[in-house]
Structure formats: C-alpha cells, structure tokens
Image (tube, rainbow, N blue to C red):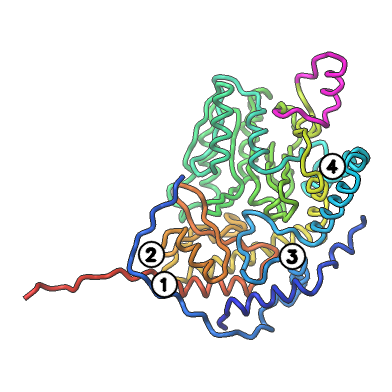
Amino acid sequence: MRFTRRGVLAIGGAAIGAGAATFAATRDTGPEPVEPKPAAAAPSPPPPRPDFSKLASGDDWDEVRRQFAFSSEVVHLSALLIASHPAPVRARIEEYRARLDADPVQYLQENNDRLRDASMAAAAKYLAIEPKHVALTESTTMGLGLVYHGLQLKPGQEILTTEQDYYVTYEATRLAARRTGAGVRRIPLFEDIDEVAEPALVERVIGAIKPETRVLALTWVHSSSGLKMPIRKVADALAEINARRAEADQVLFVVDGVHGFANQDATMESLGCDFLIAGCHKWLFGPRGTGIVATGKRGFRDVMPTIPSFTDGAAWSAWQKGKEPPDSIQTGWGFMPGGFKAFEHQWALAEAFAFHERIGKAKIAERTASLASRLKDGLADIAHVRLVTPRAPELSAGIVSFDIDGFTPNAAAKRLREHAIVASVAPYARPHVRLTPSLANTPAEIDYALQTIAEIRPPQTATRPSGKKG
C-alpha cells in the first residue's frame, strides 16, 4: 500500500480530537557542510490517497497516541530532541501553575518539599534505587557538567572517554581536567561502524584503562550513529579491574544515558554504572527543563556540589551556626542545585514517570525496538540510502541514522520536512540524518517515511556529451 502525508496524519488528528483524559483519570492523585549545487531536481509527486482506516495501530497504542496534542500537519519523528507533553503531564503542569499564580508564596512554602520529593521518589522507583540516590536537574547538559565538575580529581589521574562522544561530554571533561590538573584521553570506539560487535566494543574500552584512569565516561546510545553501547558488559569487566584497586583508585563509571533512558527497560542495577545522567524532556516525554542524576550503590560520596543546594540540611545548619559543612555529601539532596526554578515542571515530573509506569517499561522498550527495526530494515532495502545505525537490537535503540546519496544531511532533512516528516541532523563533524520512532508513533508513519525516502532521488548533475567535436 502507498501512503500520503494527509492519509497518515489524518489518523493522528482524529486521535488527538478524541479526548485525552483516559490516562489522567487512572492516576491516584561547527558550521554546516556546504551543499553542492547540482541541477535542480523536480520535487517528488505526492503518492495516491490511501485507505485511512488501515493506518491506525489497531491496539492500545492508539490510546497512548491520543494523549499527545501533536499537530496533525506533520509526522513527528524527532523524539530525541524535545518532548510534547502527554495529557496527564500537561494537566498536572497547569494545575500547579494555576495554584502558584493564585498564591505563589504560600503554595511554594507549603508544597515544595512534598512535591519535589515525590518527583525524586518517582525517578528512584523507575530506576529501582532509593530516592536519596537521585538528584533533580534541568537537563542532561547540566547533569553532566555538575558530575564532572564535582569529581575530586588530582594531577596524575585521568578521565578516559571516546572520540565518538558528544560535545557535552567532550567539553565537560575538558573543563574538569583544566580545573583539577587531571588529564583526558579519548580513544576511537571503532574504525568501521558496520563491523561493530559487543565483545570488540567492550575490549576496546576496557583495554584502554590504565593505572591512572579514575573516570570512564561513556554514552549509552550515541546521538550521532544510534549505536547503543553494552553498558552492563563494560560495567562487569570494569568491576574486575576495580576489585584489584584500593577504593580511592577505583574507576568511576559515568554514563550519558539520555537516549536510552525511558526507551530501554533498564534499572541502575541492570546497567551497573556509578552515575547515570539524563534529561527527562526527551524519551520520557516529561516536563521540559527537567533531568536527573542517578547513582548506584556508591551514592554521591565521590562528587561535591557545584551549585549551592537548598535541600542540604547539613550545609544550611553549618552556615547558620558559622561552622564549616561536612567535606563530603552522601545523598542527592546535598548534590541537587538550589535556586528558584520552574517549580510546576519539576513537580509534574512525577506524573511523567507515572505515565510510563502505567504503559509499562518493557512494553515501551518493545514498541521502540519494533518501530526502529521496521525503519532500519526498510532503509537497508533502499539503494540510494546508507544505513548508519547497527541493525542488531543489542547495538541500537530508538535513534536511526542514515545518509541519502546526493544530499547533505541538512538538505535531506529539509526535503523530508517538505513532505511533512520531522527529521533532525546529528550536529557532529560527520553528521547524519536521524529519524527517531517513539511510543507516540505508528507503523504507518514509519511506512510513509520509508516510501518518501525511497522517492527522494539524488539530484541529476549535468553531463557533457562524450566524443570529439567534428
């Protein structure tokens, strides 16, 4: 069957208009590359109109879809960037906003501790840890900056990371090293992504650890290639190294987890890292401007706060008594940055976790994998497309990266937008086009995207006739 943009989007529009209270009712309370200028190519003609009745999922995922107020004018396949709030989250934000607007001082004083701690508890439950092992932040970037700046590194020690990691890890580790006198060493994860395999990735990382390595900085799911790292297997191998070291010399495992968080069925125990940092306004579809730092069994004792905490009772008490606070912190309350913020968003974070829990973490992971596999398999069959993301589910999650022959990534994303498909481009030295299916998408949207990509032909360049002039 061939699909049209209007046909696919009609389902989304109808679903949005059907009402969005079901879930809420169940709750207890560098510069871009220069694009070549080939001869102009005619735009792809729109395909014929499909049978709209066959485009819905036909299962409970249609009810999930109804919770989002997506525009019916485009196919939203860029969940990795910033979230649309589902109905229960929108409602909770508006409730708290209205109460703050009516009586901001009293409502804040009477409810902030309770509602903030509820969000911490929800995050802790989601990751199967204690609330004291969670700190709330405003983004992945903030969380990574706080953790790397808070590590008590010394000259002669080093942070080990990779050449494939994102700018934020690169810059946060660079600044931490500059401040402390420690070093940063970056290794390539692979030479050819088409040849990657879990054992080789683990061996590459673990084999690079030296006696002076104090921190291992990795990314769970890479936003450039969509590669998912075998975090648990790295953690197991790292545990063998740490077992032979004194505690003060053990390697701390810090993970940028934002593109695996909330689309993979995982806990801190199943991951095995010491720090997991993630924004909550991407795959969790949580309130914009929210994030977390989560810790394993070591807690927060290996970092110091960078921004004064409003929730560290020991620091407050020491200040009031004119004494020095403790030299270390143990909990997220001591690490969490203070200051006034968008409280209604921070408080509504608990609702986002509840939304995911009601659907089921395992179901969300299965849905994400199913849609991503459908997209990868389809892209692999298109002759003028190079699939970048590994097809194996153990090496990928929800990000699907690819290139289209004859187009720069930005030009390809622009052409897709002309067909009402929201794609994005990885902002790396070697960029790729990305589509990122999520719990809010349908198989029909994936099929429409594949059909559109198949019909985006490389521009034809003018050629000079062969032979000599007579």
Q: Residue at x 63, y 63 (%)?
A: 437
The kind of secondary structure element at disc 1 is loop
Q: Which residue is mark 2?
A: 406
Residue type (three-letter) at the residue carrying disc 2: Gly
- Of the image marks 1 and 2, the number of the one nearer the N terminus: 2
As helix, strand or loop, the secondary structure at mark 4 comes to helix
Instruction: Give the total number of marks visible in the rendering.
Output: 4
Q: Dot 2: within a 10 Å radius of its alpha carbon, few (fewer than 14), some, or many (20 or more) residues?
A: some
- Boundaries of the magenta span: 306-327
Q: CA distance from mark 2 to mark 3?
A: 35 Å
Would you place residue 453 above or below residue 359 in this image? below
Ranked by sequence position, the earlier of labels 2 and 3 is 3
Counting residues from the start of the chain, the first of labels 4 and 1 encountered is 4
The vertical placement of 383 against 298, above or below, is below
The mark found on residue 457 in the picture is 1
Q: Tell me the SS state at disc 3.
A: loop
In the rendered image, residue 102, in percent from the top left (x then y), is placed at 90, 48
**Mark 4 burial class by Cα count in 10 Å: few <14, some 14-19, many 20+:** some
- Which of pointers 4 and 2 lies earlier in the amino acid sequence? 4
Q: Are marks 4 and 3 in contact (CB under 8 Å)?
A: no
Under circle 2, the secondary element is loop
Q: Are marks 3 and 1 in contact (CB under 8 Å)?
A: no
Quarter of the figure that contains the N terminus? bottom right
